[in-house]
Amino acid sequence: MISKKLKNIFALSIPVFIAHGMEEIFNGFYNVDWSAKLMFGFLNGMSVSQATFIVFQFMLWLVLVVFALLIASEKWRLRLMFLPAIIYIVELQHIWMAVKTWSYYPGLITAAPLVIIGLFFWKELIKNYKQEKY
């Protein structure tokens, strides 16, 4: 079962994730990051409407799978919490790239609080996972 504390930590991170995404958009993260180029580079040769439609379809498929898992069982709801947990770790890349280049890297300012929130999230997630009976 997902504890109230884990839910609250996740809820706290949502506005930070939104701010983080806006920081990345406004500062051109997609132009400098290799992972963004790898994941979305295939969209470059397409029209805006075609690329938008493809991204919308992928997101819809993802939402449908997530909804199916959410209604499957409480165990799957807890397991799905590992997805944001992994994202908290990935946000370390912003800090690493800033240190590596010794300059601002798009997303750095809001990545720091996400990493801190992620530490608390991971601690509570592991506690929840250990309490779950499998």
Image (cartoon, rainbow, N blue to C red):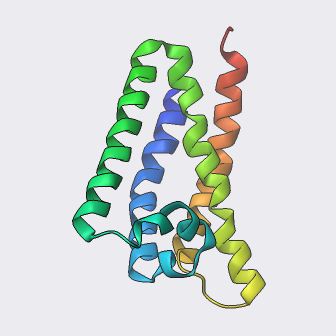
Where is residue 103, by image quadrant?
Answer: bottom right
Q: Is residue 130 left or right of 121 when viewed as pictured?
A: right
Where the C terminus falls, by quadrant?
top right
* Viewer-proximal residue among 45 and 40: 45
Q: Residue furthest bottom?
A: 103
Where is residue 112, by image quadrant?
Answer: bottom right
- Residue ID at (45%, 82%): 28
- Residue ID at (54%, 70%): 37
- Residue ID at (32%, 40%): 60
Vertical side of 28 occupied by 65: above or below: above
Vertical side of 7 occupied by 9: above or below: below
Vertical side of 6 occupied by 57: above or below: below
Where the N terminus falls, by quadrant?
top right
Q: Residue furthest right?
A: 100
* Viewer-proximal residue among 85 and 25: 25
Vertical side of 67 occupied by 117: above or below: below
Q: Is residue 127 visible?
A: yes
Residue 82 is situated, as x and y percent measured from the top left of the image, at: 61, 36
* Viewer-proximal residue among 64 and 89: 64
Residue 129 is situated, as x and y percent measured from the top left of the image, at: 68, 23
Residue 22 is situated, as x and y percent measured from the top left of the image, at: 38, 71
Q: Is residue 22 left or right of 56 when viewed as pictured?
A: right
- Residue ID at (61%, 53%): 88
Residue 120 is situated, as x and y percent measured from the top left of the image, at: 65, 46
